[in-house]
Amino acid sequence: MTEPLIVLNPDMRVRTANAAFYKTFKGTPEETEGFYFYQIGKAVWNFDELRDKLEYIFTGNKKSESFELSLDFPQLGNKTLVFNVMQLDHDNVKSSRYLMAIQDITDRANYLRELNSNKEYFRLLVQNAFDIITIYSVDGTIKYQSESVERVLGYQPAERVGKGEKEDLLHPEDVEKYNQMFYRCLSETNGVVNESFRLRHKDGSYRLIEAVFMNLLENQYINGLVGNYRDITEQQEVARQKEEFIAIASHELKTPVTSIKGYAQIIREHYLGSSDTEVNGLIERLNIQVGRLSTLIENLLDITKITAGTLELRLTDFDINDLISELVEEWRKTTKIAIITELQPSEKIRADRARIAQVITNLLSNAVKYSLAAERIIIRSSFTESLGNEKARVMVSVQDFGIGVSIEQQKLIFERFIRVKGETTDSIPGLGLGLYISSQIIRRHEGAIWVKSSGAKGSVFGFTLPVENQGAEAKKIY
Ligand code: ADP
C-alpha cells in the first residue's frame, strides 16, 4: 500500500511497518521492529501529544479512532498527519494489536491555509478599497457591493444587495446612458466599458460617479458584471472652476490686449522706417510679441467655447487654394524659410473660412517653429471626387523638414495642453493648444486631421474636409 502503515502492540512496541512507512519517515525494519514506537528512528516520534492520544486509545481499548496532528520532525520539518488507528483481533485482549495508517496531508493543509489567508487578504483589500466594487446580475440587480458604498453613498452594503441602481439611485437624466453602458457591457464578454453618471447619496445629494464596467458573466466564480465606481464629484468641481477661471481671465485680457495691439500697429505705421534703426527693431519686436499674446488669448477663448460646446461655424463657399495663397503670402513676410506651394485645382468648399484659416495658420506656424535650420516648407492641396457613398473631399497638408514627432507623441499632440518635452522644444514658445483647437475645428466640419512623421526627417500635418458641409452647422462639439 502506498500509505504508511504500522502495527503496534498495546504497550506501544512496534510489531511491523510497511515499506511506505520506512520510505516516508526514513527508517529501517532493524531499527524499528521490537522497539517502542516513540523511541524508533532516534526518537523522532517522541511527541507528548501523540503519546497521549495513543495511550488514550490503547488503555481505553478503543476499536478505532482517528486524529490529526501537526508535528515538527527534526529532519522532515513540520508535517500535518492524519492518524487512523484500528484495533485488530479485539476479541483477544491479550494479543490485541493496533494498525495505524498515517496519511500525510501537509501539502493540502498548507494549500488550505494559504487559500484562507489569500481569501482574507482579498476580502480586506476589497473592503478597504476607496472605490466601490459591485457585482451585478444580468438584470442589473446588485449581487455584491463592497463596504466603501457607505463612504461614497451613505448606504450599508446590505441595504443595496438585491436592488438595482436604476430604480432608486440613478439621476433621471442619466438613465439613458446608464442603460446603454449596461447593454454595451452585456454584449461583450470580458469587454470593458467606461461611463460617468450621477447617483443619489443617502442624504439626497447627487455624487458624480466615474464607472468602469466589465463583463465577467462567463467567469464561473463571478458570473456577473463587475462595476468599479469612483466618486469624482470634487475633481469635477475643481475642473469646472479651472475652466471658469480660464474663461474669465481670457475674456478680461482680451479687451486691453486688443487695444495694445491696435496702438502697436499705429506706432508701426507712423514710425517704422524712421532713421533710428534701434527704434525700428523695437517696433518690430513689439508687434511680434503683441501678436503672440493676442493669439494666445484667442486660443484660450476658443478652448472655453469648445468646452462649453458653443464654437459656432459661419459657413460660406470659398476656394481653398485662394485662402492658402493669401496665408502663405503673409507668412513669407515673416519667415526666412521658403514656403513652396503645390496646389491642385478644386471645387469651392463650404466651410468656415476664418476657422479653416486658423487651422492652416497653426500648421504653418508649427512647421516654421519646429523646423530649426531647415530651408523649406511645402504646402499642398488636392481634391478627390465623390465616389459611391464617399463625399468629395479636399486635402491640405503642410510638410516640414524639422525635428519630427515620435510615434508615441503622434497619438497625444492633438490633445489639449500637450507639448513634446525635449531640449529643442523647451525653448520654443507655445501652450500646446493649437493642434487641439485645429482638430476640434476640423471635427466640427466632419473632416479628419492627421500627422505623419518618421522622426528626424520632419513631419507632414494635414487635414481633409468634405466639399459639401451643410450638416456641420447644426452640430455642437462636447
Ligand atoms: P504649441 O506649438 O503651441 O506647443 P500645438 O498644439 O500646436 O501647440 O502643438 C502641440 C505639440 O506638438 C508641440 O508642442 C510640438 O511638440 C508638437 N508639434 C506640433 N507641430 C509640430 C511639427 N511641425 N514638428 C514637430 N513637432 C510638432
Image (cartoon, rainbow, N blue to C red):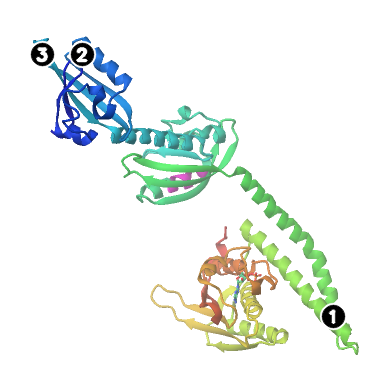
Q: Secondary structure at mark 2?
A: helix
Residue depicted at x 13% and y 17%: 97
Quadrant in the rendering for residue 477? bottom right
- Foreground tag (2 vs 1): 2
- Three-letter amino acid code at disc 3? Ser
Residue density around tag 3, few if under 14, some if 14–19, many if 20 or more, within 10 Å = few
Rendered image: mark on residue 64: none
- Foreground tag (2 vs 3): 3
* Residue that carries the numbered disc 2 in the rendered image: 58
Cα–Cα gap, marks 2 and 3? 13 Å
Q: Secondary structure at mark 1?
A: helix
Residue at far right of view: 275
Residue 413 at x, y percent in the picture:
57, 67
Who is closer to the viewer here, 433 or 219?
219
Residue at far front of view: 30
Cα–Cα gap, marks 1 and 3? 123 Å
* Residue that carries the numbered disc 1 in the rendered image: 283
Who is closer to the viewer here, 381 or 287?
287
Q: Main secondary structure of the magenta part?
A: helix
Instruction: State whether residue 52 is above or below residue 233.
Output: above
* Residue that carries the numbered disc 3 in the rendered image: 95
Quadrant in the rendering for residue 428? bottom right
Mark nearer the N terminus (2 vs 1): 2
Residue 45 visible, this angle: yes
Residue density around tag 2, few if under 14, some if 14–19, many if 20 or more, within 10 Å = many
Magenta stretch in the rendered image? 174-181
Residue depicted at x 33% and y 43%: 219
Residue 466 visible, this angle: no
Magenta region includes residue 446: no
Residue 80 at x, y percent in the picture:
30, 29
Mark nearer the N terminus (2 vs 3): 2
Residue 39 at x, y percent in the picture:
25, 24
